[in-house]
Amino acid sequence: MSFTPTSVLVTGGAGFIGSNYLLHVVPAHPDTQYVNLDALTYAGNLANLRAIEEADNYAFVHGDINEGALIDRLFEEHQFDAVVHFAAESHVDRSILDPTAFVTTNVHGTLVLLQAARKAWEGAKHACRFHHVSTDEVFGTLGMEGHFTADTPYAPRSPYAASKAAADHLVRAFGTTYDFPYVITNTSNNYGPYQFPEKLIPLVIRNAVVGDPIPVYGKGENVRDWLFVEDHCEALDSVLHQAGDQTTWLIGGDQEITNLELVERLLDEVDRATGKPVGTRRSLIQFVTDRPGHDFRYALDSSPVKEALKWTPKHDLSSGIARTVAWYLGNMDWLNDVLDGGYREYYAAQYGSRGMN
Ligand code: NAD
Ligand code: DAU
């Protein structure tokens, strides 16, 4: 199937994945208009989008996906035929500290967007498409073996995962009940430029540079599958343009590693890039109290997206880590600018009671 949108509402486009997505699609599709709606929470940063902010086919709107009247007005003004929905509260640890915003944005906010799209697309729905950008965490946790597939039953275990699962369920329920046009993508851990330093990889790089302790939860044995963000964005663009209606796609990097091994590789790369003997910074590692309900392992069977849509990630973990470390070291101003008082408060709440020095 081939779908070519003319006017796309991108939600959460000032965040980590959303901004990488816009940096890719705005120049790649000059005949498509992109409107980025973002509430600019602590995780949203317009500085990420400097390279495209003057582009003719890009506009920014500051607003909340929960504001139904605003969303209806934007549909009326821009005649969107696609929505690519990234906006969310995205950090598991924050959802454990307080789940409220996760339900408001990830569940209610998704419903508001679905309602607006359903109303606007009445009569023309098959020429339109709602793309929900979701996560592998909806499937729960794996042991040492096996992979999630699109048929794996949902079993979310954190408030964040539960809110994303609820949003996926709403999207599919709209498909079944209202014959609503959607695609869903469930993706593994992304990393790369512009990721907020509450997430493991940028947090490790930042702490390594300033010489702060590196918090590793539990024994560092949990396993994640890492996908370089630019590869993810290429897959998202392929799904929007080529996937069949009402389909779900799992997008993983096939780069599994334990947290401790990943942290050691990152620290060694920072040593290498800063001219220190490799291994010096490993002494910064500090094992701290584990995350409650910590999912042991995620892994996705991405063979359908590779076979049907001919997508292949261009980065393995080695090249992705090298690019990511180089980007953060070259953009320390970006890093320092996002670390305001709110970050320090969060950091104290999250790590103060976990046995950090
Ligand atoms: P992020 O936290 O970096 O960015 C979220 C963006 O959404 C920010 O720009 C923020 O300002 C905006 N936002 C938050 N609440 C909003 C609201 N109510 N109205 C409008 N805008 C709002 O998140 P991310 O890591 O870029 O993740 C993007 C999406 O991808 C999320 O839906 C997340 O669940 C999903 N996802 C992320 C990963 C990952 O590894 N980061 C993996 C799989 C899926
Ligand atoms: O799997 C996809 C998900 O990946 C996305 O849906 C989420 O939005 C995204 O935040 C990410 O979730 P994780 O919880 O896996 O990512 P995080 O970077 O927070 O943690 C990665 C692993 O590292 C996890 O096992 C917890 C561990 N960790 C994390 C932090 C922040 C530590 O050991 N120490 C830390 O300080």
Image (cartoon, rainbow, N blue to C red):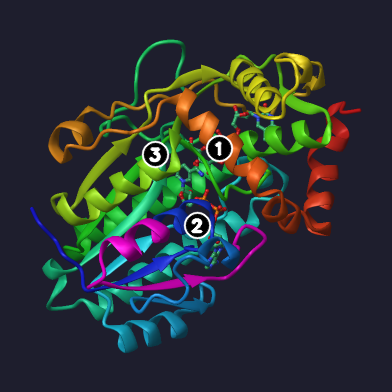
Element on which disc 1 rests: helix
- Of badges 1 and 3, the one in the foreground is 1
Residue ID at (61%, 27%): 294
Q: Where is 51 relative to 241, above or below?
A: below
* The quarter of the displayed image where residue 220 is located: top right
- The CA span between labels 1 and 2 is 28 Å
- The CA span between labels 3 and 2 is 16 Å
Q: Earlier in the sequence, mark 1 or mark 3?
A: 3
Q: Amino acid at mark 3?
A: Thr
Neighbor class of circle 2 (other Cα within 10 Å; few <14, some 14-19, many 20+) is: many
Neighbor class of circle 1 (other Cα within 10 Å; few <14, some 14-19, many 20+) is: many
Residue 128 locus on image (x, y percent):
19, 68
Q: Which residues are magenta?
A: 22-45
Q: In this orientation, which residue lies closer to the viewer: 219 or 208?
A: 208
Q: Earlier in the sequence, mark 1 or mark 2?
A: 2
Question: In the rendered image, which residue does mark 2 sit on?
Answer: 106
Question: Does any atom of ligand 1 lie closer than 8 Å to the CB of label 3?
Answer: yes
Residue ID at (65%, 29%): 273
Mark 1 vs 3: CB contact within 8 A: no
Residue 326 locus on image (x, y percent):
59, 37
Residue 246 in the figure: left or right of residue 347: left
- The CA span between labels 1 and 3 is 19 Å
Question: In the rendered image, which residue does mark 3 sit on?
Answer: 187
Residue 167 in the figure: left or right of residue 294: left
| Camera sees residue 148 | yes
Q: In this orientation, which residue lies closer to the viewer: 61 or 179?
A: 61
Question: In the rendered image, which residue does mark 1 sit on?
Answer: 324
